[in-house]
Amino acid sequence: MARTVLNRPGHGLYGVLMSWLPADFVHPARAELPTGHHLRPIRASDVDLDYPAVMGSRERLWSMFGEPWGWPPPSMTVEEDRVDLARHEAEMESHRSFNYALFDAAEETLLGCVYVDPPERAGADAEISWWVVDPLAGTEVERTLDEFVPRWIADRWPFTQPRYIGRDLTWTEWLNLPPLDA
């Protein structure tokens, strides 16, 4: 799932990358869910699976991410999605932010995404959000992901104050928090 973020997480004034992870941190390469699904870092080469997942769930995703991220735009093309996925891939390699895709066992279908981002708002050391495709909304897979992500963050990531946007607080509440650079 690609997204365009105008305010660059992890960057302070003048766009200088701030340290938000320990220098020796190694991000997880894969995370297994008890449903048989798994998370792995998204790649630009996933565009043929990502694009139909995003655009097939676009209206619901816009209701979640439209106001804060302006994503996904109704006119997004496959090439624009590929460019965003390449950016996500580069951000993960440099530990600026992380986008994990949710896949079926055979990686034939992209079923959602999990974002682990540096904080843009005061009061947290990471901001985490996620989604599943429309056919999985309200299903056991979504409920399992909802339970899994906070445990995974607690067990495998170096955060002490993660914020689960869309879970701990609404996106509107998040937007009303003071920005870190303010």
Image: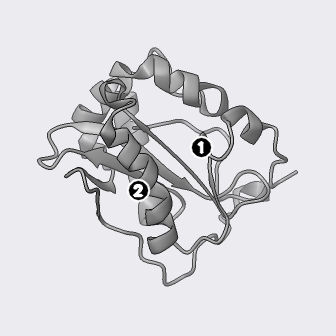
Q: Residue at x 43, y 64 (%)?
A: 152
Please say if 97 is above or below 131. Answer: below
Q: In this orientation, does residue 87 appear? A: no
Q: Position of residue 118 (x, y in %)?
A: 62, 59
Q: Position of residue 111 (x, y in %)?
A: 29, 37
- Identify the residue position indicated by label 2 in the image: 148
- Along the horizontal axis of the image, is 52 left or right of 66? left
Please name the amino acid that badge 2 sits on.
Phe
Q: Is the image coloured rainbow, by chain, by secondary structure, or in one colour?
A: one colour
Please name the amino acid that badge 1 sits on.
Arg
Q: Secondary structure at mark 2?
A: helix
- Identify the residue position indicated by label 1 in the image: 167
Q: Of the two numbered discs 1 and 2 on the same chain, state the one appearing first in sequence.
A: 2
Nearer to me, 37 or 7: 37
Nearer to me, 162 or 13: 162
Q: Position of residue 37 (x, y in %)?
A: 23, 50
Quarter of the picture containing the N terminus is top left
Q: Quadrant of residue 177?
A: top right
**Around disc 1, counting alpha carbons within 10 Å, would you say few (fewer than 14), some (14 to 19), or many (20 or more)?**
few
Q: Residue at x 56, y 29 (%)?
A: 64
